[in-house]
């Protein structure tokens, strides 16, 4: 199998000028040299918790002098030895984080410190091909945790794989909330309606253009089709229909599944996603969603390597997906190059948008400066 991953380049201040955003917006850098910077959680006081999956730890950052950056003196490690720690969220003064097979809980202490991690829930599926786990508290008071498939395009025996699980607030009971989701890492509950939306990553090695990355409205009890169907209940020609439970045809199986509400370019590798709840951006951006597309590694022309905006209409329905921050990938001297693998997305306390690059360890910030 041939890889087509663009040549990776490190971050430099000069490359910052290559990034493009809509008129009136500006991109800056809040921190560099943070290692495998993945998911973010912003606290009300402007401090940030950051997971680093490869390092297995959590960092605390706070811009104490108000200069718009997290200097080396304004960041510190607050938890470690958390295998493959990735998604995180905060509830009732406690930080919850998920790794390969465990959800941990830690008390938030004075000045951002954390207590020793305690197991909140355990015994989740093996990581396999997809070790990045998502985690978010829902408006119903339950914890929603995602676990990707252990492989590319074959059904798995463990029903908790390729799913989003709903966990009781005491961690002692859980259910499969939605299935047939190959790798949904980024998801969030829509403000006002409480509807759950998320991006699912499609299978690799099925060609340059299928299957697309799916934007789904994720509902309890529904099956979203992986590995036999993609998009609007389309049959995936590369999967083996003899593996379908119940020996029904692939067409009949796909007819019973839930189709996506929007699609994006194949292999773009959606990671973090969050609805915009700030006030700084123009009114038409409010309650839209932003997602980090980490970027393809097996597509002849790269896809992803950008922040996208999911535009919702006046009836709170998803309408389209459009680029928001681009310029991380580019052709040069006959080959594709890139200087950012994007991962986490979060709204900062002032309403600006933060996102991470886990390749160079950068936290970027997008602010609206006015004008058109």
Image (spheres, helix red, strand yellow):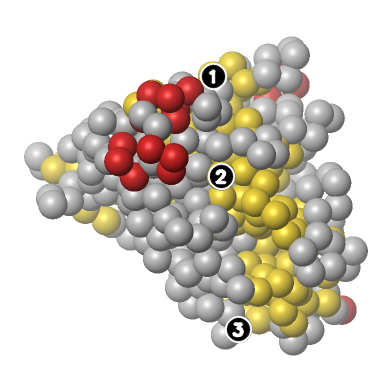
- In which quadrant is the C terminus drawn? top right
| Location of residue 201 with respect to 120 vertically, above or below | above
Q: Give the SS element for disc 1.
A: strand
Mark on residue 320?
A: 1
Q: Are marks 3 and 1 in contact (CB under 8 Å)?
A: no
Count neighbours of disc 1 (C-alpha within 10 A) and say few if under 14, some if 14 to 19, many if 20 or more: some
For disc 3, the marked residue is 80
Q: Which of the 4 image quadrants contains residue 217?
A: top right
The numbered mark, 2 or 1, whose residue comes first in the sequence reads 2
Residue 11 x/y as whole percent:
38, 57
Count neighbours of disc 2 (C-alpha within 10 A) and say few if under 14, some if 14 to 19, many if 20 or more: many
Q: Give the SS element for disc 3.
A: loop
Residue 105 x/y as whole percent:
76, 74
The numbered mark, 3 or 1, whose residue comes first in the sequence reads 3
Residue 303 x/y as whole percent:
32, 36
- Per the model, the C-alpha gap separating discs 2 and 3 is 31 Å
Q: Disc count in the image?
A: 3
For disc 2, the marked residue is 179
Identified at 34% across, 45% down, the residue is: 243
């Amino acid at each position: 199998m041939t890889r087509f991953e663009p040549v990776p380049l490190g971050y430099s201040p000069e490359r910052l000028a290559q990034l493009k955003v809509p008129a009136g917006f500006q991109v800056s850098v809040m921190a560099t040299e943070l290692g495998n910077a993945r998911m973010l959680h912003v606290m009300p006081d402007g401090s940030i918790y950051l997971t680093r999956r490869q390092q297995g730890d959590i960092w605390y950052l706070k811009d104490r002098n108000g200069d718009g950056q997290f200097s080396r003196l304004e960041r510190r490690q607050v938890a470690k030895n958390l295998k493959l720690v990735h998604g995180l969220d905060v509830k009732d003064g406690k930080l919850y984080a998920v790794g390969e097979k465990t959800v941990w809980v830690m008390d938030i202490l004075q000045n951002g410190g954390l207590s020793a991690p305690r197991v909140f829930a355990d015994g989740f599926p093996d990581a396999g091909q997809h070790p990045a786990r998502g985690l978010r508290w829902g408006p119903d008071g339950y914890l929603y945790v995602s676990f990707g498939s252990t492989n590319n395009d074959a059904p798995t025996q463990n029903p908790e794989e390729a799913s989003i699980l709903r966990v009781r607030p005491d961690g002692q009971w859980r259910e499969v909330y939605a299935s047939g989701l190959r790798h949904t890492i980024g998801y969030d509950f829509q403000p006002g309606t409480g509807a759950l939306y998320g991006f699912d990553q499609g299978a690799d090695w099925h060609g340059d253009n299928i299957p697309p990355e799916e934007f789904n409205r994720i509902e309890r009890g529904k099956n979203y089709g992986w590995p036999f169907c993609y998009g609007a209940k389309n049959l995936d020609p590369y999967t083996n229909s003899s593996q379908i439970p119940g020996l029904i045809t692939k067409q009949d199986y796909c007819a019973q599944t839930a189709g996506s509400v929007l699609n994006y370019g194949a292999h773009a590798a959606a990671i973090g996603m969050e609805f915009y709840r700030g006030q700084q951006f123009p009114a038409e951006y409010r309650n839209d969603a932003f997602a980090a597309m980490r970027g393809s590694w097996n597509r002849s022309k790269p896809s992803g390597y950008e922040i996208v905006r999911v535009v919702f209409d006046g009836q709170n329905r998803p309408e389209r997906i459009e680029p928001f921050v681009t310029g991380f990938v580019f052709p040069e001297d006959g080959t594709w190059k890139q200087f950012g693998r994007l991962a986490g997305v979060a709204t900062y306390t002032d309403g600006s948008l933060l996102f991470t690059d886990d390749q160079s360890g950068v936290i970027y910030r997008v602010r609206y400066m006015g004008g058109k």
